[in-house]
Image (cartoon, helix red, strand yellow):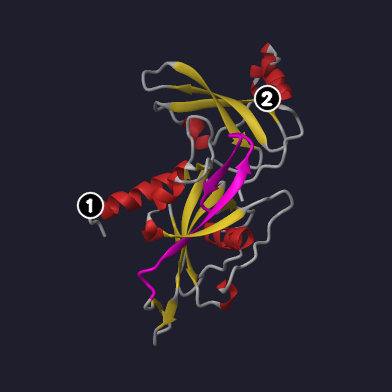
Amino acid sequence: MLLLPQAPKSVLTFALAMSARSSDSTDQSSKVPLPSAAAACSAVPRVDSIEPVASTKWLSLQTISYTDQEGTARKWDVATRTTKKSVDKADAVVIIPLLRRHDVTGDGSCKGNGDSNRIDTLLVEQYRPPVGKTTIEFPAGLIDDGETPEEAALRELREETGYVGERCRVVPQVSPQVCMSPGLTDESVHVVVVEVDLNNPYNHGTPKPNLDDGEHVTVKRVELNAGLKEVLEKADGNMPIMGLYLFAVGLELGASFSLT
């Protein structure tokens, strides 16, 4: 789950730390080193340096010095996770669960049975302090050290919803690394499509999530073909996350254009 514990410093303290930056903070020793390939690159646009401004336990504010397409030196403020290891690795996974019943064929592969026209997915609702509202999202979570995106997706799906995804018979589909809000943060994710076999005994009834302390999540199972966009628009004041809403719009447009 993409849930950040409360930061140990207040927002006011964070802002004061930013404004109190001294002129010598631009010393090279305080700057975040860039990958050697990026530092050696002379093409534009390019990032020239990254300077830490202030940080809490989980988030850091940095100022990027970069050169634009016209060769003009500019600056950009960015928020990043203090746990981020590399710009080349995604921070988290966003999971698109596809719930249906599977039959095992003679060769050991899976195919949908008579209920294959009915495909459900899972949404999670949780209060998000930055927007002051309960949001509606796909299940998601950070990738732990040593995990692959597939492993992180299967782990987070079970922890957050209780459902067990397929790992071998139907391999999860992993997207390339995609950005989230590149004007504000360097956060990136992999989108992972996970098949959930409803014939699996672990997925019978209402599976029980295994939530971390401080996580308060409501899991909703909805039918994809029943109009996901309409479900989101009748969310009783809850705010859909952009990626989920775009997914719903894509489903609706695909159906209207008879795309397969």
Q: Position of residue 182 (x, y in %)?
A: 48, 34
Residue shown at 28% from the left, 53% from the top: 254
Residue shown at 28% from the left, 55% from the top: 255
Left/right placement of residue 231 relative to residue 147 reads: left
Circle nearer the N terminus (1, 2): 2
Residue, disc 1: 257
Mark 1–mark 2 Cα distance, whole angstroms, equals: 56 Å
Residue shown at 64% from the left, 36% from the top: 129
> Callout 2, which amino acid?
Ser
Disc 1, SS:
loop
Which stretch appears magenta? 115-138
- Circle 2 residues within 10 Å: few <14, some 14–19, many ≥20: few
Q: Position of residue 183 (x, y in %)?
A: 48, 30
Instruction: Between residue 152 and residue 127, name the one nearer to us.
Output: 127
Residue, disc 2: 29
Q: Is residue 96 above or below residue 38?
A: below
Q: Nearer the viewer, mark 1 or mark 2?
A: 1
Q: Residue furthest top?
A: 23
Q: Is residue 199 above or below residue 85?
A: below
Q: Position of residue 19 (x, y in %)?
A: 67, 15
Q: Give the quadrant of the C terminus.
A: bottom left
Residue shown at 48% from the left, 18% from the top: 74
